[in-house]
Amino acid sequence: MTYIVYGKKKTEKRFKPFDMRDNKFVVNLFHASMFTENDLEALTKEINFMNEMNPEYTFEVRKRG
């Protein structure tokens, strides 16, 4: 199972894939960061931290396929 981080500004309607390496939103999944189940626990902690430090944004982890 692979996981992708999605995020959006709280004023926006749609979530976009997020590139964790470059810290930016991307349009194409090809450029999005992908993670495995082995990374899920650390990734969840990182996403919680990102949500806490960036109150104007919302981030979440989603399963891919």
Image (cartoon, rainbow, N blue to C red):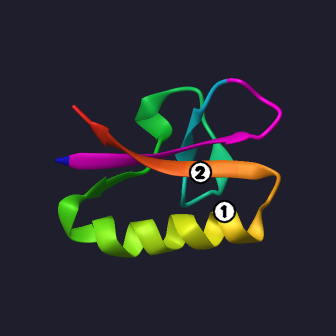
- Residue 31's spot in the image, x, y percent? 48, 39
- Please name the residue shown 32% across and 72% down the image: 41
Looking at the rendered structure, the kind of residue marked 2 is Phe
Q: Magenta stretch mostly in which secondary structure?
A: strand
- Please name the residue shown 44% across and 31% down the image: 29
Which quarter of the image is occupied by the C terminus?
A: top left
Mark 2 lies on a secondary structure that is strand
Which residues are drawn in magenta?
2-13
- Residue 43's spot in the image, x, y percent? 41, 67
Q: Which mark is residue 65?
A: none
Q: Would you say the residues marked 2 and 1 are in contact, meaning their CB atoms lie under 8 Å apart? A: yes
* Mark-to-mark CA distance, 2 and 1: 6 Å
- Residue 35's spot in the image, x, y percent? 31, 56
Q: Nearer the viewer, residue 27 or 63?
A: 63
Taking 65 as reference, is 32 left or right? right
Taking 30 as reference, is 49 left or right? right
Looking at the rendered structure, the kind of residue marked 1 is Asn
Q: Which mark is residue 51?
A: 1
- Please name the residue shown 62% across and 57% down the image: 22
Q: Which residue is mark 2?
A: 59
